[in-house]
Image: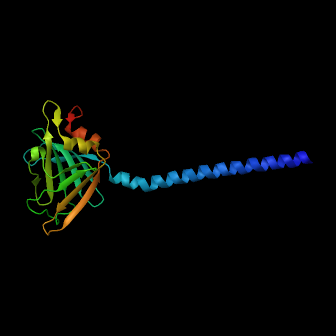
Amino acid sequence: MLIVEDFYSFMNIKLNSMKKFIEKKSSCLCVKILLFIFCAPSLAIAEWHIISHANLNSDKKTQVAYTENRSGHSLEIYRDSVGAVRARFTLNSKLNIFLNGICPTYQVDLTLVRNTSFNDAPCISNLNWSEFVLGYITNNNINSLSLDALLNGNIIKLRYVLDNGNYKETSFSLVGSKRAALKVIGKKTIINP
């Protein structure tokens, strides 16, 4: 009788440990599923794509690395016909207009803060977009701290003033920017910060 009780006791302990193991594994799986569900939409928003823009002066199309944030602002990186690499920030509505003559400030992560183009030239602005020249490609080389930051950073924040005097800020994920930008500026391009 003692052997049977020991056997039942042993089996009970074994079943309890198996039950705890299964509960632990299933809760771990639930956490993974929840993380995927909550992170998937933000990953989709943060994607960089390659799109084509028609040039106004010719029939050629320009390949552009493009992303749009949750508030509808867009950020583009492209190479123009003379080898300049540019970043264009566009507001989310044609009703929003930049204050004339004031370039947005951009900050990549916690390091690079700028509101000028390459060689401290001012940005190029229209009513609802501003563009920065990041540098010029010569012999498959470009010297650009800004481009290096955009391709290797995590987040870019842009701060700007609207024509009504309101100060605004928006941000973009830079995850995937390197892959997309190198496709449009040239995979063999060497970027020197």
The residue shown at (31%, 44%) is 176
The number of callouts visible is: 0
Residue 147, by quadrant, is: top left
Q: How is the image coloured?
A: rainbow
Q: Say whether residue 75 is left or right of residue 6.
A: left
The residue most toward the front is: 111
- Nearest the camera: 98 or 107? 107
Quarter of the image with the C terminus is top left
Residue 165 falls left or right of residue 32: left
Residue 140 to residue 147: above or below: above
Residue 71 placed where, x, y %? 28, 61
Vertical comparison of 166 with 18: above or below: below
Q: From the viewer's perspective, is residue 42 above or below residue 161?
A: above
Is residue 154 found left or right of 130 in the rendered image?
Answer: right
Question: Which of 92/13 is in front?
Answer: 13
Residue at 17% from the left image edge and 31% from the top image edge? 140
The spot of residue 149 in percent (x, y) is 24, 44
Residue situated furthest right in the rendering: 1
The percent position of residue 84, horizontal first and vertical second, equals 12, 41
145 or 180, which lies in front? 145
> Residue at coordinates 11% horizontally, 60% vertically from top-left?
127
Front-most of residues 79 and 108: 108
Residue 125 place in picture, x, y as percent: 10, 55
